[in-house]
Image (tube, coloured by chain):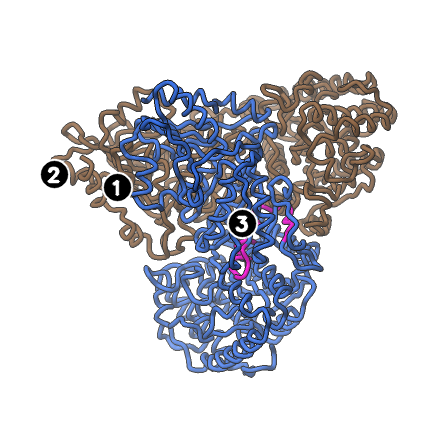
Chain colours: A blue, B brown
Amino acid sequence: MTGTTPPFDSAAEWQAINSLRVLAMDAVQQANSGHPGTPMALAPAAWMLWTRHLKHAPETPDWADRDRFVLSCGHASMLLYGLLHLTGYDLSIDDIKAFRQWGSKTPGHPERGHTVGVETTTGPLGQGISNAVGMAISERMLRAEFGEAVVNHRTWVIASDGDLMEGISHESASLAGHLGLGRLTVIWDDNSITIDGRTDLAFSEGVAQRFEAYGWRTLRVDDGTDLVAIDAALSRAGMEEDKPTLIVLKTIIGDPAPTKRDTAGAHGAPLGAEEIAATKKILGWPDEPFFVPKEAYRTLPDLQTQGAGLVRDWESRLAASPKASEFTARMAGTLPDGWESALPDLSAESIATRQASQKALGQLAHAIPALAGGSADLTGSNGTKITAGGVFSASMSGTRFHFGVREHGMAAILNGMAAHGGVRPYGATFLVFADYCKPSLRLAALMGLPATFIFSHDSIGVGEDGPTHQPVEHLAMLRGIPGMVTLRPGDAAETVESWRTLLRRTDGPTTLILTRQSLAAQERRADPVGDTARGAYILHEPEAAPRAVVIATGSELQIAVDAAKALAAEGIPTRVVSMPSWELFLAQDASWRDRVLPPALSARVSVEAGSTFGWCRFVGDRGRAIGIDHFGASAPGKRLFEEFGFTAARVAQAVRDIV
Amino acid sequence: MTGTTPPFDSAAEWQAINSLRVLAMDAVQQANSGHPGTPMALAPAAWMLWTRHLKHAPETPDWADRDRFVLSCGHASMLLYGLLHLTGYDLSIDDIKAFRQWGSKTPGHPERGHTVGVETTTGPLGQGISNAVGMAISERMLRAEFGEAVVNHRTWVIASDGDLMEGISHESASLAGHLGLGRLTVIWDDNSITIDGRTDLAFSEGVAQRFEAYGWRTLRVDDGTDLVAIDAALSRAGMEEDKPTLIVLKTIIGDPAPTKRDTAGAHGAPLGAEEIAATKKILGWPDEPFFVPKEAYRTLPDLQTQGAGLVRDWESRLAASPKASEFTARMAGTLPDGWESALPDLSAESIATRQASQKALGQLAHAIPALAGGSADLTGSNGTKITAGGVFSASMSGTRFHFGVREHGMAAILNGMAAHGGVRPYGATFLVFADYCKPSLRLAALMGLPATFIFSHDSIGVGEDGPTHQPVEHLAMLRGIPGMVTLRPGDAAETVESWRTLLRRTDGPTTLILTRQSLAAQERRADPVGDTARGAYILHEPEAAPRAVVIATGSELQIAVDAAKALAAEGIPTRVVSMPSWELFLAQDASWRDRVLPPALSARVSVEAGSTFGWCRFVGDRGRAIGIDHFGASAPGKRLFEEFGFTAARVAQAVRDIV
């Protein structure tokens, strides 16, 4: 947006740019912790982006049609906080002074939902740039659905060397190039410095060449302080429609600190009082910490006014659109009225839960336009082979994706799609490959994003592919993530209920754990609706008062029920509890939990084809946990279940032993 | 090795090549499961590699100076099994007929230690190619130490599209190029097919261009059935010393199956009786399953003889080397006599355990030449800043590495370094980034490799960097991995003992969990040596018989001890158990375990600045687990410990509540 308000005035721009640098130095110094060098080096480019190219409205930070900005190198958080402050967002100098302190709005790495204007939580490298790919995907998807009058924005990223070394960035950048995401621009801070020293200790690749191989356009700015060159590159990037753009921005970390500039020492520690004083002298700055001259705020009113104008004009266009209320509901995360009627009745179907999931998803995708996603090259296997909507490609929008063999990139892209708003994304791979996604799963939970992660082939039931493909500890891993809900349905009906539950959930992510192999449809009492949502419920109650309870999940429901029937015949009436989700159960009030698992009913056996890790919580000292705590083996799944003891006989014996 | 035995005879070669194809089809058909297409497509190139270029001795599969071959696309396992069989390894046709069955030597994906000739367990994509980088590193390191007469071999990889889509391959390939690993050759099976269909569904990058950007040399073979072109490319690659080589090998998956060739249908399912019959007709093959003509075995005796000759010559050279016994000990994994005397006495030092680790490592690295490794760009932070040995670079060998911001690649490279033999590798990053490494950590455990993973900054003690950097569920994640030993020492002395313990451990990997912040040196009874190795021990015993026990790990030892002292003064004598490792403790016999945690002493409180997940195992129904089950926050570490309840007062109160 060169040429529009605010008008360019070099001296005034540099007052603002240097304010960003000083705030970064001073905040880190006061906190005695943090990363000053990168904010200082990037201040010129970031300033030009935020004041001349980024389409945003500082007083309406949630404006749906704003450009999205992602600071992938989240350790440079002071850059973002300084920008938010100087461009008129609700972030004060006092907030900045409280950088990295308990309860402040300025945590060490930017956190979505915690500070205004932060689109996604970054810090772990490679994540932000991958989220941004998801945001660009959402923008195109929504633009195709609602029209350019209503959806017309871009996604801008600042990324570091470290971000580009991370494998996840390869996955997401390759996919971005493949999908021709022309509205994505990544500014790579090429400063040749990492924590250990100069990048050439470990990194000598031709980055631009690599990105060109991915199908990106690459631009170069040789001097990260040349505002005109920066502006020109941003303008070019801002006109691109066909390919994502990488701007190689040469900077000097810690510029203009006299002795620490261009050294690793400027990266991740306070510069120190002496170096700060010397830098301020060079800048012609007064000594006073956190001093910001009036001129630095020169553009603020213009940006606010301009932003307000953009929002007003957009609101008119939205009001004029026939899809206005649909769009508003989409961006609010509200699903269409009556969507639950699309859930199929599979209560009589003895099929693999991945197939049940596919049936449910197939119908839900017709009812819920926001539902978009795909698999990391395992579409048929994961049960995501559906027909609603089209395939998203370089030339077409759609709601179905081929993510390629890129599990981690896929997961982070889902996070970005959800963070953007207007989309309810899902992704899929094998449960054993949840390992590849773990960092992104964690961030989804930290951010409370409504992303769905489908993990099929969930146990030794995988069979012949062998131990590298057979999950053991993965359910435990997922259950350990704060804020993650993990659902392992035990038949087709529970799978449908799982979809109902996870789609109703808007404040956090869910993993859906599915079998490769067929599971018998369980008989239930008349009204099972809602029980899956409660995490655990009584699946089978003996005629006489239970003396023991077997807790089972997923594929182990059947042997639990078989064991209970055998035990009842022996005079040991046994309840069977199905526990599709630990987290949902533990969130119930005590009356439900005690009804399902009465404290007095202490003869408890759990059975799940996964690690016993953590099951002591439910079975207690008197109980037994049946599981598998070693790696699997390559053989048909049925053989493995027998060899590793997942039989009704073993369950029954465990009950006898403790009763 | 073109021109040496065995002499090239096109008709005979094709008998062998087609035998490989037929065995793959038939084995998968019989198992009713598996991946026939890729073995069929790669058979010509693999045959030329194994008979003309790979330096190996089929009757001495553990010969130290053999070339290493890695099938990174492990699903093509039948290719490897067929090669092993036809070239004279101890793998019979009956073994092949038992493909994917319980107890066979031919599991679905190749498993190191399970089948002769398998260098590393593959299956999860991207791992094998990364392991191979580690193997090439080990070769160069050992060659520099012991001389070319004793160490002089290459590493060859076959990799798929999927391997190259995986982010981890970007990390390891970039590092390989940076380190100029000229003895590494990767044959990329460019077949344009993945599970979901043609690769251009998701993948359209210029792979060769990308690898050239990494500093690799790229060669191209346009027809994967052109034996002469294949041989020429392998010869060129085999002469390269300066850059790793990527051979782009165009193949047709499932070639020459008439209807399924070049389709995703040939990838991961049996071809079916009809298609197999039709293929055999094209090949001029009899119907009989697993038929292998005599001519296919033509080269076998030559390869065995040649191999035996290579081994004999090498043994002579080894015997003539002044370092012969040292080399033999290195390859056997035996550490130098007296290495334990290098362990420092830090029992009086109140320092962060990452600093204690650095002191120990610094001295151990002088005493143990096999000890090699580094950090993923956090050298100073992780405590791996040592001076012994040199830095391994493109021009120099050494034992110190800058892995760059490539945690996952680093971990898989460590696995390869260890798998090669002769090296005891270690790597380091922040504990929260163990998430990035998880797939490789799992494989290290599956393979029982003696790799060491250092994870520092292990809790909310991280402080101001905030929740994205503060581990919560990570100890639980690591403890869930079968075969992994996790050590979280509570002071400098325990850290030294941890190093002793993990270096003595040769049959599996260890994670070493270290603090950012200083920990007080704990007072102990006279002979603590060995107690860390037992996983848990009595750190503090009250004068009167204990009525309660507090179990603590790592940074929480101090508040446990403080609480115990306060409780004793109130008439609640309390034992403190330090539990640096769950796995080591659980492996002790019952007498030790009952001595440390007597079953009758059921008033138990655990305290650890991590998830409470799984602690019920040690504290039982009557006990309490103090931990953190939510994400952290950005503030100084001290503040976080207080705010989140890691205080002696809270520990003491928990004991009072249950006693």
Disc nearer the start of the sequence (2/3) = 3
What chain is tagged by disc 1?
B
Question: Residue B558, which numbered label?
Answer: 1
SS for dot 2: loop
Viewer-proximal residue among A459 and B389: A459
The image shows residue A31 at horizontal and vertical percentages of 35, 62
What residue is rendered at 63% in x and 67% in y?
A222
Where on the picture, by quarter, is residue B586?
Answer: top left
* Visible residue check, residue B369: no
Q: Amino acid at mark 3?
A: Val
Residue indicated by mark 3 = B405
Label 1 SS: helix
| Relative side of B565 to B481, left or right | left
Q: CA distance from mark 2 to mark 3?
A: 51 Å
**Which amino acid is tagged 1?**
Gln
Dot 1 or dot 2: first in sequence order is 1
* Above or below A230: residue B355: above
**Front residue of A634 and A157:** A634
User: For residue B604, what is the image quadrant?
Assistant: top left
- In the picture, the quarter occupied by the C terminus of chain B is top left
Residue B570: mark in rendering:
2
What is the three-letter code of the residue carrying label 2? Glu
Q: CA distance from mark 3 to mark 1?
A: 34 Å
Labels 3 & 1 near each other (Cβ < 8 A): no
Q: Secondary structure at mark 3?
A: loop
Q: Nearer the viewer, residue A475 or A259?
A: A475
Start-end of magenta stretch: A400-424
**Residue at 55 percent of width and 75 percent of height:** A319
Of pointers 3 and 1, the one earlier in the residue sequence: 3
Relative to B280, say whether A21 is above or below. Answer: below
Q: Is residue A230 visible?
A: yes
Could you tell me residue A441's position as x and y percent? 49, 48
